[in-house]
Amino acid sequence: MPWETESKALLKSRKITSFPHSACKMATEGLHENETLASLKNEAESLKGKLEEERAKLHDVELHQVAERVEALGQFVMKTRRTLKGHGNKVLCMDWCKDKRRIVSSSQDGKVIVWDSFTTNKEHAVTMPCTWVMACAYAPSGCAIACGGLDNKCSVYPLTFDKNENMAAKKKSVAMHTNYLSACSFTNSDMQILTASGDGTCALWDVESGQLLQSFHGHGADVLCLDLAPSETGNTFVSGGCDKKAMVWDMRSGQCIQSFETHDSDINSVRYYPSGDAFASGSDDATCRLYDLRADREVAIYSKESIIFGASSVDFSLSGRLLFAGYNDYTINVWDVLKGSRVSILFGHENRVSTLRVSPDGTAFCSGSWDHTLRIWA
Amino acid sequence: MAQAPTDPSSAEAADPEESSPNMIVYRKIEDIITRMQDDKTGGVPIRTVKSFLSKIPSVVTGADIVQWLMKNLSIEDQGEAIHLGSLIAAQGYVFPISDHVLTLKDDGTFYRFQAPYFWPSNCWEPENTDYAIYLCKRTMQNKARLELADYEAENLARLQRAFARKWEFIFMQAEAQVKIDRKKDKTERKILDSQERAFWDVHRPVPGCVNTTEMDIRKCRRMKNPQKVKKSVYGVTEESQPQSPVHVPSQPVRKTTKEDFRKQITFLNLQIDRHCLKMSKVAESLIAYTEQYVEYDPFITPAEPSNPWISDDAALWDIEMSKEPSQQRVKRWGFSMDEVLKDPVGRDQFLRFLESEFSSENLRFWLAVQDLKKQPLQDVTTRVEEIWQEFLAPGAQSAINLDSHSYEKTSQNVKDPGRYTYEDAQEHIYKLMKSDSYARFLRSNAYQDLLLAKKKVNN
């Protein structure tokens, strides 16, 4: 049929890019028989090559070169200011409360603890029915926490100050995945939770009803981490997985907007640069990297010959100038984001650093470790 | 017992196990260890040291290892080199000849390299029967250096209780091992004994020491092919050992389908058409952002009056809670509209200013839509209707000004109410506010006075 040949030619010349879905379907339906798996694969490969070519044209300079004119940072004196002891096994995750001093932490022993880390007092504790509670999050209101792990669920617990009330009694099961829960985060409301799972998907849930609002498919393996974009208006988030990819998602449509694949191993942690225009990642390949969304490219890599263990957790200081990264070699390395150099190495933990977050006002950061403790650094 | 060393370079690159997180680290350490032992390219001096009546074969001092690490891995700080060396020891690649605790000291303490047979990359998971055989055979040999440490004696007692019924078998295996060992050359035996002990120090560490064989459960599925796991040093396996739950093989990777490729192609085309910025522009933007916010970053510019974590004084937080915003805080509202909207005090000031000009409907609409998105699903329909009535319906009390296209689209959306019903309208209003209301706010006396700390906040 003549329209078939014409649309084939048009598609080939790539003149049509934004096609109304129905027309596209019509145009490609006739082509199905002619497209083999191999030809599609080749097409994908050639497009990848073209994309890389286009991006490379814009790669006119390196970030650290432009940053040469920026004043060097002074010497840092960062110390452990608080040590939180109380978990009976590896600390796997932690999150800050908006009040800048409370934190929630979760552990392999199934315990989730809420602390006033300023005083080091434990304020709440709940025992989960499973071990390995790999994810926990504080609600924006400060009135609830969410957690989950090997139970494949994410549950929300309201925080009550009534001594007589059992926290576990008011537990609400929100998210249900088909594999372990690796990360969870409230959106800017107590009413929605975003989750990441070993089942390779992310999902957005309505807390009240437990209903799935949107699911995000695209990772080729376990998703290990996620971070919501800091914008007041944004509806995007980034996720990282065992497929070595970092993906940026549109929360509204469930579509993947951008994808980055330059790491050599699992991405354990992703965190947005405070302006929301870029994000950092930490990986088992022992490097941290910075990806800019506007350049659609990796713009910096933070690594050293002597750092051979994986980076488990990363976060930025308030201005984005410093990147704090916790590693499986028990240390925390502090990187100059712009210049690409390491400004400090912090010793203290006696086993892997598994989680790290900067406080909401940037006055400190908290690290959690397999040595059962959490430390506040400033 | 000591078999031909496994050649690490013979591992196929295609082997998926090679890319497992643990294996990546092992290969890096093995590379370091191999270079360290290469005397042709400046490796550490491995010597036989004379001591009293005997010789200590094949040792190197901790100091030499630390020095080598600093020189060859560009490590400037000695502490860092010691830390890395200790980790390499803890993983089981190098060990002190006279201590069960696997750590590196920067002095004359003697260390030996582990035999490749015992390397962690061989996926060892030695069982308790093996450990029992090992401890048992140690007690059979009359050598001071093989005497059991207290924790080992305790472990042995516990294993004797646990394996009471098959202790005869274990004893026989231990005797057999002793016989085999006796046939070896004296010097070789010294080395092998120490390597075997170091192997057990990794898999049955001294109480209080980190067990480096512990795994991150999220990565377990891909880590070890059950067929490749080595369970026995002495060729003995526990019959009733069920397959470790950790070794459930991961799902077979789904083959890429035509549909997958089509999706990829669509995605790639979208990416190719995306307008991207040059690196130079991006770099300038990132630098500009950090420079603007550096004075607000407590890690770089010390917080005033003090950082609560350092001074133990929460004054900074008390000040922030009060309704009186500091000049620095007010200045930040001028960086972008998001900053004003993010800060509750800023938002409040912005709203008051607009109310004083009788033009607050845009901001209130924007806030209402933000609030809508925070509602539980069951309340969404009601809120959508409320917002429509107040801001958009004909004759609305706080009518906002949308262009006809946005208004048309929004009217359609309202028929199927959801959290994103007003997304388009909100975007439009946001842009309007940015160029109009926000700009006026920054020029206003209300804002300027706060910025110059001329006036207190009106409550």
Image: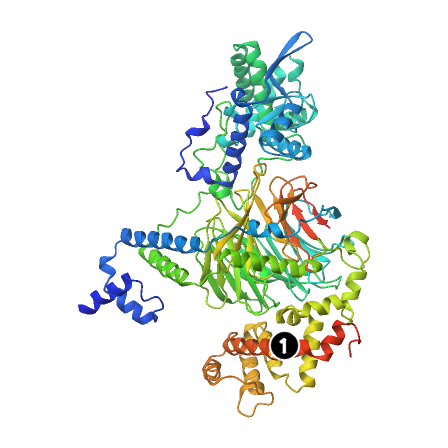
User: Element at badge 1?
Assistant: helix
Residue furthest top as drawn? B53
Chain label for disc 1: B
Residue A243 lies, with reference to residue B423, above or below; the image says: above
Task: Using the image as rendered, state which of residue B250 and residue B70 is in the foreground.
Answer: B70
Across and down, in percent, residue A281 comes to 55, 51
The part of the image, by quadrant, that contains residue B366 is: bottom right
The part of the image, by quadrant, that contains residue A317 is: bottom right
Answer few, some or many: residues within 10 Å of disc 1's Cα (few below 14, many 20 plus, some between 14 and 19): some
Residue B315 lies, with reference to residue A262, above or below; the image says: below
Residue B1 lies, with reference to residue B414, above or below; the image says: above
> What residue do we see at 57% from left, 83% from top?
B387
Q: Amino acid at mark 1?
A: Ala
Q: Pick the quarter of the image with the C terminus of chain B.
A: bottom right
Across and down, in percent, residue B98 comes to 67, 20
- The reply to whether residue A170 is visible in this rendering is yes
Task: Using the image as rendered, state which of residue A265 and residue A369 is in the foreground.
Answer: A265
Residue furthest bottom as drawn? B395
- The reply to whether residue A179 is visible in this rendering is no
> What residue do we see at 62% from left, 72% from top?
B337
> What residue do we see at 76% from left, 57% from top?
B303
The part of the image, by quadrant, that contains residue B162 is: top right
Residue occupied by mark 1: B439
> What residue do we see at 71% from left, 48% from top?
A74
Across and down, in percent, residue B289 comes to 62, 60
Residue B71 lies, with reference to residue B371, above or below; the image says: above
Task: Using the image as rendered, state which of residue B270 and residue B161 is in the foreground.
Answer: B270
Question: In the drawing, does residue A176 fall left or right of residue B273?
Answer: right
Question: In the drawing, does residue A96 fall left or right of residue B406?
Answer: right
Across and down, in percent, residue B158 comes to 64, 28
